[in-house]
Amino acid sequence: MTDFTMQKDADGVAVITWDVPGKSMNVLSLDGAAELDALIDEALADDAVKGIVITSGKKDFAAGMDLNVIAAMKDGGAQAVFDGIMGLHQALRKIELAGMDPKTKKGGKPIASALPGTALGIGLELPLATHRIFAAENPKAKIGLPEIMVGIFPGGGGTTRLVRKLGAMGAAPFLLEGKLSDPARAKAAGLIDEVAADPVAAARAWVLQAGDADLVKPWDAKGYKMPGGEPYHPAGFMTFLGASAMVHGKTLGVYPAAKALLSAVYEGAMVPFDTALKIEARWFTNVLMNPSSTAMIRSLFINKEALEKGANRPEAPDQRVRKLGILGAGMMGAGIAYVSAMAGIEVVLIDAAQDAADRGKAHSAGLLDKAISRRKATEEKKAEVLARITATTDYAALDGCDLVVEAVFEDPKVKAEVTARAEAAISADAIFATNTSTLPISDLARASSRPDQFVGIHFFSPVDKMALVEIIKGKRTGPRAVAKALDFVRQIRKTPIVVNDARFFYANRCIIPYINEGIRMVAEGVSPTLVENAAKLMGMPLGPLQLVDETSIDLGVKIAKATRAALGDTYPDDAVDAVIFRLADLGRLGRKAKAGFYDYDEGARRQGLWPGLATEWPEADQQPDLTELQHRLMFAQSLEAVRALQEGVLEDIREGDVGAILGWGFAPWTGGPFGWLDMLGAARAVEIAEGLARKLGPRFAAPQLLKDMAAKGESFYGRVSTGKQAA
Ligand code: NAD
């Protein structure tokens, strides 16, 4: 396998082309890095070579480091990781110094990079080591260092180089937030040097005329001062102090990568460049060896991608959707129409009245107008997308639809009626899907004349923002319907999980106990501030009280009533109902009513917890231990996820973990509930659960599956590591 090849031309330019065989995107492996290093050695030693251009044989430059390689490297332990990273640093430093005399800084060979498209992670760290970066005029290209998004940080010299290039303040959005830019913006920010129609030609011309001084990086020149000041410079001091506070405020200390990144930047800023690289490598190793980065890479990168590529897709011919029917142009139907039309699918959007259908279509226009105002779309794009949506009341317009998604009122009778009407208008092989969030798919399928072609496709709100789609198999749902749903989700670039039919499916099943546990605490007299902070300090993006305000208190009341009706005497949530029914009576229905657990201003911006909570549910003098509250909030969700697995609602823990993070924001640093329970270990998890159960009741009883695992010393990912669920 050859990832890099070199061609030398008559002018003395050696062009090194990165083109990993069999992949659509370049990723760097350790073998690839060694190949590149050997080619650099050869070019530097060859007198006929005057300059070097590094480019890509693909439409993009590179997607980054092969994260599977990182996962494998970790098996060798911390020393192996550190040695591997230092090897990479040496190779990149060789490019940067380019054979120049260490004293005079003369006699080096210019090395430029030419990026035809996207350049991410090591795909930008490598160019940052070259002397000049040229990017193609390609507005679709994304340039940046997104490592922080999967729980690591740029460890291929990107952290050290970018901070020295832009200063700590300038580099912060790229390093700490993983901000990506198109080439024009990347140039404006100083990430790259030039944007050119033909970057290879421009790079080639540049290396042929570059002089010795062009090759010396600012940090290798005498008298270098870091832009914005070093940590003990008065200006730098403010930046570092502020950054530290800001990062802690945002991550609350649960993301090891953010803290390690800051440490690498701070410590590295006070020492010479090569020592800074070593410090970066140490912190990078530290983060890589942290179980959180393993879990995040596994769920947010490897398994998310596997699910998106159809890891659990049944065998069936291509089921891509050509024409989509949507029944109900309300909040969900309108959102589904938008994401589908954006993906190039022709949409028929039906509602009972024409003005309702038109309003549904107008939702797309509104989102596109917003995108235009942010320069993320054009008037042409808007016209093109809107032209794909037909808003109508006429079911005959469904003719030719190969998939219909129903999103009418949550009422079985209304759903049955529209199912029958739609099926009369579509061809015999079309698939029918329901977006219900609470009604069993198998029951709704009774209204269908072809239940094997009936499936649940459960979107989350707001549809344009939420990445997860839950596909639900009813008792009689056939494989083609599942394949159709998966191919559709892939078309609209969302992440699917496939689960079996049961009350609340998977995501809502786990999120309700989380919300309820928080509300229960308020009823017990726990300070609402403590409840919210306990959740946030565990890495939950929203505390349970904020979350229920967002989804609305009246929805909670509705679900509570329906659940009580279904469960009768065994209904366990009276304490929760006492709180939400009271809030509903007070008209505090959540953010939409500008009043809920929180107060809101006129623009529905959250202000603070409602002081009246303390009158309604007085706070106890003795507040409970923070850890116990955190255990309650985390176990409420995680034990439910285990029960879903035990009952076969969930078939694949990868889906359980990816779905939890994308569906309801389960503390991403854990990699998901199963990843988190693995970190604790089954035995410790059982011990905590049983302790909570003794104190608080059977809702915390450890599921048999977890007890069995504890007895056998098993972990969730260990149990399946030899099967199809391997990560
Ligand atoms: P909504 O009330 O905003 O929209 C429902 C739409 O269906 C309305 O426009 C209504 O006019 C239309 N409608 C009603 N009867 C109809 C009929 N006979 N023929 C054609 N159109 C009809 O509701 P929504 O929030 O969009 O929810 C729709 C479905 O999606 C429900 O099943 C709900 O459970 C589910 N869901 C909602 C959410 C959410 O967060 N709101 C999330 C996931 C799933």
Image (cartoon, rainbow, N blue to C red):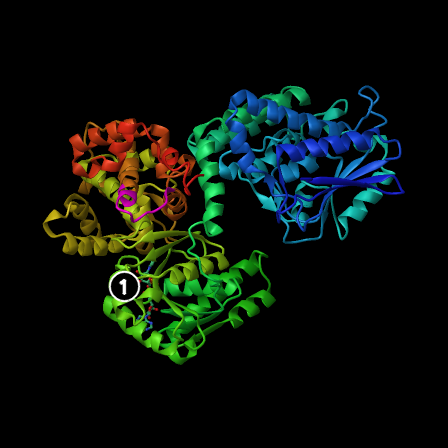
| Quadrant in the rendering for residue 334 | bottom left
Residue most toward the left?
569
| Residue depicted at 33% across the width and 61% down the height | 477
Residue 253, compared with residue 331, is above or below; it is above
Quarter in which the C terminus is drawn: top left
Image position, residue 375 (x, y; %): 59, 57
Residue 404 in picture, x, y percent from top left: 39, 68
Residue 647 colored in magenta in the image: yes
Q: Is mark 1 on a helix, strand or loop?
A: loop
Q: Can residue 162 be seen in this view?
A: no
Judged left or right of residue 465, residue 544 is left
Q: Is residue 271 visible to us here?
A: yes
234 lies left or right of 546? right
Give the position of the N terminus as an image quadrant: top right
Tell me what residue is drawn at x 28 percent, y 36 percent: 635
Residue at horizontal 32 percent and vertical 67 percent from the top: 408
Please tell me whether residue 312 is drawn above or below residue 336 in the rendered image: above
Query: Is 395 drawn above or below residue 73 in the view shown?
Result: below
Q: Does the magenta stretch include residue 571?
A: no
Q: Horizontally, is 214 left or right of 675 in the view?
A: right
Where does ligand 1 appear, by image quarter? bottom left
> Residue 379 location, x and y as percent?
59, 66
Amino acid on which the number 1 mark rests in the picture: Glu
The answer to which of 597 and 639 lies nearer the viewer is 639
Whether ligand 1 has any atom under 8 Å from the Cβ at mark 1 is answered as: yes
What is the magenta range? 643-653
Q: Nearer the viewer, residue 483 or 65?
A: 483
The image quadrant that residue 223 belongs to is top right
Please give the residue where the numbered disc 1 appears in the rendered image. Answer: 410
Can you give x and y, in whole percent of width and height, for residue 536 in the image? 36, 36
